[in-house]
Image (cartoon, helix red, strand yellow):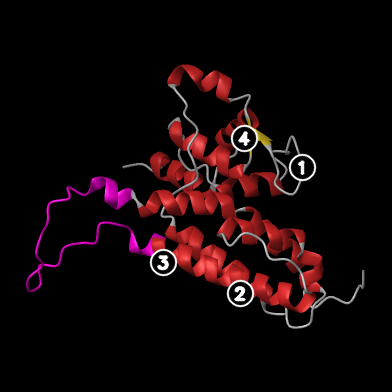
Amino acid sequence: MTEHWFIPRHEQQEIVDALTEVPDIMSDLIAASFTTLRAANWNPKVSTGDNVQPLPYNVNAVDAQDRLLIELERWVLWLADLRNMPQPKNTVVGYAEWLQRNILLLAATDGSQSAHHDITSEIRHARRATNTRPAKPVIHAVDVAQARNRLLNANGCATLAKEIGIEGLTRVRISNLRSLGHITPTIDGRIPIYRVGDVLDAHETVITWKRKKEKKKEKKPA
């Protein structure tokens, strides 16, 4: 295939990475959409004056699903029409998978220059509208020792640490520990995977600037 790309190589990869998240984002959006529905008591109410009753569903989550569908569909139909290709199932996930498979063709087609911005921006918006945090591992006190041997990415390590009561271990903290050579990924791929015990030990051993400041205050005479 031609090496003349209308979407640079690094942006192609970023589009694919973003599209890979779409099935999980859609699941979260659907769950978020019905959170208010589950909590509703279904008693009919009349809104008068300023006493406006909330809608029995999450408007932001529903809107994000529609926006994501429209954006992905726009690029799929555009490329399929230009290249005379069969169209996929008209679902958000179906469009996302189709665009992943045809990313090189998209990148080689004049007019696709804004695809990176348009697609990744809409996926970021959808992710924010889920109003959810990454799934938390279920960790009980008796399982802490076993948890140390788990292999997780930075997100997973930070979430697990919070679950077992360890403060200050964030993604940024883990990134800093790695860049300073205090931890090394067990699997050093596109998404580094760490042994949880190594991360916890480094976090405890390497004192942060904030903790140093607190220790100085403790030693200061009254």
Q: CA distance from mark 2 to mark 3?
A: 17 Å
Three-letter amino acid code at disc 4? Answer: Val
Examine the rendered structure and indicate whether residue 208 appears above or below residue 150. Answer: below
Q: Main secondary structure of the magenta part?
A: loop
Is there a contact, CB below 8 Å, between mark 2 and mark 3? no
Q: Secondary structure at mark 1?
A: loop
Residue in the picture at 92% in, 73% down: 2
Return the residue at label 2: 74
Residue in the picture at 72% in, 59% down: 100
Examine the rendered structure and indicate whether residue 2 appears above or below residue 133. Answer: below
Residue 219 sits in quarter? top left
In the rendered image, the quadrant that contains the C terminus is top left
Instruction: Choose mark 1 or mark 3, whichever is in front.
Output: 3
Sequence-first disc among 4 and 1: 1
Three-letter amino acid code at disc 3? Answer: Asp
Q: Position of residue 193 (x, y in %)?
A: 69, 39
Three-letter amino acid code at disc 2? Answer: Arg
Three-letter amino acid code at disc 1? Answer: Asp
Sequence-first disc among 2 and 4: 2
Q: Is residue 8 visible?
A: no
Instruction: Choose mark 4 or mark 1, whichever is in front.
Output: 1
Return the residue at label 1: 188
Instruction: Choose mark 3 or mark 4, whichever is in front.
Output: 3
Instruction: Choose mark 2 or mark 4, whichever is in front.
Output: 2
Sequence-first disc among 3 and 4: 3
Part of the protein shown in magenta: 35-61
Sequence-first disc among 2 and 1: 2
Q: Position of residue 20 (x, y in %)?
A: 65, 54
